[in-house]
Image: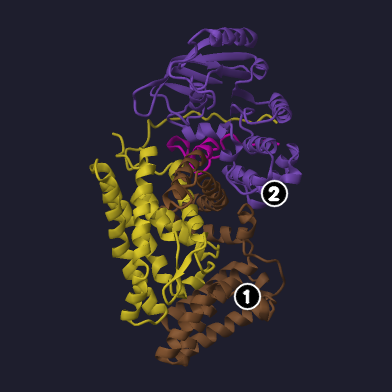
């Protein structure tokens, strides 16, 4: 259960509004967020785990305010980044999973055992002791997912998790996300992927301009992007 | 430089007394050698340190004489020049005291890293910070910082190679500023990404004030 | 595979403590990454200089950068982390492999001087960046020069005298061989620090009220 209560975000230098006041309650198990680059998708996602704090209003996750209980919220909200290399901290996958489990204050032997289980569950056992630099992009992203899900957070956020992946790995990661028991909120540029959700938000220029069934949201977004001069102000980039 | 992570540990599997000895006495002995040589540099000190270090490596870690000699290779030029300088200005006994002492300390330190796996070294270092907890030290955060540092070295070394190639491609390889600026900017950006990723994973953060009793918050079942 | 979530309701303190801001995870990783940066610069093969061949490396460039980019607190912490990694035996020092052995080596004085050097460079750099709007590069260069002349060189000379048993005159002569290289490195450090602060203006900005 994620709630935005009049939450708005100003840029660091306080000159631009990144997200206009937003009141929203997210309860569906699969929620996708679509919108152009710079529209505020990532900001919205970062608000949920308190990586970004609202300049006004508040955000509550499982009944806790992200401003007052940020680190508690982050322990129950997993976050997967677009680039797994900025997510993985340790030299090998096994060590990284063990690092995740460290927040659970388990004895070292127990951690090692659990890390092995997690890696097995994600089919990464044979890659566990390889340098993360030697893994393919897809393997890295699955490892990043494993690392985050090792502590079984009830909510998972994913910021364009498939953008850097080839077609085959895109499918693998999407299938993996689809099979999770967690509530998953993800951003994407892939409209087919967006349609796999139960609810879709369309963001434009820092506002949620559409909120509803994925199929409707996708056609709304298509018509929005087709408008001449459409898209949010100040967004001229093709790539993030 | 990609394999740096794996070569970073200077540990070489083997057998012998030093391999079975826990880290604490080995580290204490190595530190003791350095302290003795710096504090009481004399013929008996140097001789004792050298005998100890050589006995440790040759018998305690079952290294060959050749393997042991090779450990001094990186330091050999400096030690050689220092030996000549001391020999001609102060006499050869003094040269032995100074250079032998340094060599003994280097070998003693090497005998520790040779016989202790990297993970044990890191855990030992973190536990060293534990007594300072009252003073505000946080062994977990210290260990985490050490891990991130080790993980970052190959990343930065790789970045350095990329940056140099890019500079060469633009014909700018002779400017050290061009060679290093993207490296440092890249390092800062990388640190920001890593910091965000750590926060997102709930690692290395201070607990919320309200959360003192909530340590088992979100505990795992099954 | 459903996790349990104990939502324990209870009194909630409002906001952060009003005392000094604690380091967040970005500060932590800046410290760690700069320690790694010093290590990476130290590992790049150095040029042996002078009769004792203590190699000229980019190591001290890394130390000055840590101070000038991160400021006194985080900069000194980065250097201390680097030294800790080297002292426990990781090969991150130039020339010598790590371990307590370096403490007995001729360059020990230089290593011990690194944390105070980063501290002085950091204090001066922070003052420059918060007050000066012009001639920042020159002022940062001077900050690095002051830092290295007040810490690295005196302690380096002391190390040569104690560990290599050089006379004061010889130690100063050996040390002087590093001065020209140092000037070049301080120029680079100042240029780099200005670039970094232009790209990341919030790194050493005055904390917002």
Q: Which chain carries label 1?
A: B
Query: Which chain appears yellow?
Result: C
Which residue carries the number 1 mark?
A: B70
- Between the C-alphas of marks 2 and 1, the distance is 29 Å
Q: Tell me, what colour scheme is on the image?
A: by chain
Asked whether the residues under marks 2 and 1 belong to the same chain, the reply is no
Q: Where is residue A210 in the image (x, y as percent from the top left)?
A: 54, 9
Q: Position of residue C119 (x, y in %)?
A: 33, 56
Residue placed at 52% from the left, 76% from the top? B77
Q: Which residue lies furthest to the front in this view?
A: B171
Query: Which chain appears brown?
Result: B
Callout in the foreground (2, 1): 1
For label 2, the crowd category at 10 Å Cα-Cα, with few meaning under 14, some 14 to 19 and many 20 or more, is some
Query: Which chain appears purple?
Result: A
Q: In this view, does B73 lie to the left or right of B17?
A: left
Rendered position, B174 above or below A144: below
Q: Front-most of A103 and B13?
A: B13
Rendered position, B147 above or below A46: below
Position of the N terminus of chain A, as image quadrant, is: top right
Q: What stretch is highlighted in magenta?
A: B195-222
Which residue carries the number 2 mark?
A: A130
For label 1, the crowd category at 10 Å Cα-Cα, with few meaning under 14, some 14 to 19 and many 20 or more, is few
Badge 1 element: helix
Residue B206: in sight, yes or no? Answer: no
Residue placed at 47% from the left, 20% from the top? A235
Q: Position of residue A218 (x, y in %)?
A: 61, 11
Residue placed at 53% from the left, 82% from the top? B49
Q: Mark 2 lies on which chain?
A: A
Q: Main secondary structure of the magenta part?
A: loop
Q: Residue A213 carries which label?
A: none
């Amino acid at each position: 259960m994620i709630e935005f209560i009049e939450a708005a975000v100003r840029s660091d230098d306080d000159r631009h509004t990144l997200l206009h006041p937003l009141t929203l309650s997210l309860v569906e198990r699969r929620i996708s967020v679509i919108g152009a680059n710079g529209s505020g998708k990532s900001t919205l996602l970062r608000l949920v785990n308190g990586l970004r704090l609202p300049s006004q209003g508040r955000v509550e996750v499982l009944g806790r305010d992200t401003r007052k209980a940020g680190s508690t919220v982050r322990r129950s909200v997993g976050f997967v980044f677009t680039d797994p290399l900025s997510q993985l901290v340790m030299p090998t996958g096994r060590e990284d999973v063990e690092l995740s489990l460290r927040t659970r204050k388990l004895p070292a032997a127990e951690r090692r055992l659990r890390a092995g289980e997690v890696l097995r569950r994600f089919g990464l056992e044979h890659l566990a002791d390889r340098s993360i630099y030697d893994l393919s992009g897809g393997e890295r992203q699955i490892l990043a997912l494993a690392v985050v899900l090792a502590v079984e957070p009830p909510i998972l956020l994913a910021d364009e998790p498939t953008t850097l992946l080839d077609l085959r790995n895109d499918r693998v990661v999407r299938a993996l996300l689809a099979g999770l028991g967690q509530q998953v909120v993800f951003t994407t540029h892939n409209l087919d992927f967006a349609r796999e959700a139960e609810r879709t938000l369309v963001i434009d220029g820092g506002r949620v301009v559409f909120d509803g069934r994925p199929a409707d949201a996708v056609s709304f977004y298509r018509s929005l992007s087709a408008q001449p001069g459409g898209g949010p102000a100040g967004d001229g980039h093709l790539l993030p | 430089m990609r394999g740096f992570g794996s070569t970073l540990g200077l540990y070489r599997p083997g057998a012998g007394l030093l391999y079975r000895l826990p880290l604490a006495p080995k580290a204490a002995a190595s530190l003791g050698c350095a302290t003795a040589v710096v504090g009481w540099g004399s013929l008996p000190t140097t001789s004792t340190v050298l005998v100890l270090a050589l006995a440790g490596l040759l018998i305690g870690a079952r290294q060959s004489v050749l393997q042991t000699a090779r450990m001094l290779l990186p330091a050999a030029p400096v030690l050689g020049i220092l030996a000549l300088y001391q020999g001609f200005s102060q006499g050869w006994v003094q040269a032995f005291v100074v250079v032998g002492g340094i060599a003994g300390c280097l070998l003693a330190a090497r005998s520790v890293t040779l016989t202790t796996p990297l993970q044990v070294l890191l855990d030992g270092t973190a536990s060293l910070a534990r007594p300072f907890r009252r003073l505000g030290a946080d062994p977990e955060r210290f260990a985490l910082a050490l891990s991130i540092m080790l993980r970052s070295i190959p990343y930065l070394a790789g970045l350095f190679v990329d940056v140099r190639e890019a500079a060469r491609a633009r014909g700018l390889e002779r400017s050290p500023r061009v060679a290093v600026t993207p490296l440092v900017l890249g390092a800062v950006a990388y640190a920001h990404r890593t910091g965000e990723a750590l926060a997102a994973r709930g690692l290395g953060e201070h607990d919320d004030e309200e959360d003192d009793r909530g340590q088992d918050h979100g505990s795992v079942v099954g | 595979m459903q996790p349990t979530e104990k939502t324990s309701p209870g009194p909630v303190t409002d906001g952060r403590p009003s005392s000094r801001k604690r380091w967040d995870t970005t500060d932590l990783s800046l410290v760690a990454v700069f320690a790694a940066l010093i290590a990476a610069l130290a590992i790049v093969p150095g040029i042996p200089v002078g009769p004792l061949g203590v190699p000229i490396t980019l190591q001290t460039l890394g130390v000055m950068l840590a101070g000038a980019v991160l400021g006194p607190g985080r900069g000194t912490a980065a250097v201390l982390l680097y030294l800790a990694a080297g002292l426990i035996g990781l090969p991150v020092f130039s020339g010598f492999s790590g371990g307590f052995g370096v403490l007995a080596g001729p360059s020990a004085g230089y290593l011990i001087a690194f944390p105070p050097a980063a501290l002085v460079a950091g204090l001066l750099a922070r003052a420059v960046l918060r007050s000066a709007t012009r001639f920042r590069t020159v002022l940062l260069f001077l900050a690095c020069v002051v830092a290295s002349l007040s810490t690295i060189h005196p302690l380096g000379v002391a190390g040569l005298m104690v560990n290599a048993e050089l006379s004061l005159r010889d130690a100063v002569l050996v040390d002087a061989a590093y001065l020209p290289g140092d000037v070049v490195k301080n120029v680079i450090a100042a240029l780099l620090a200005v670039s970094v602060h232009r790209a990341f203006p919030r790194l050493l900005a005055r904390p917002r009220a």
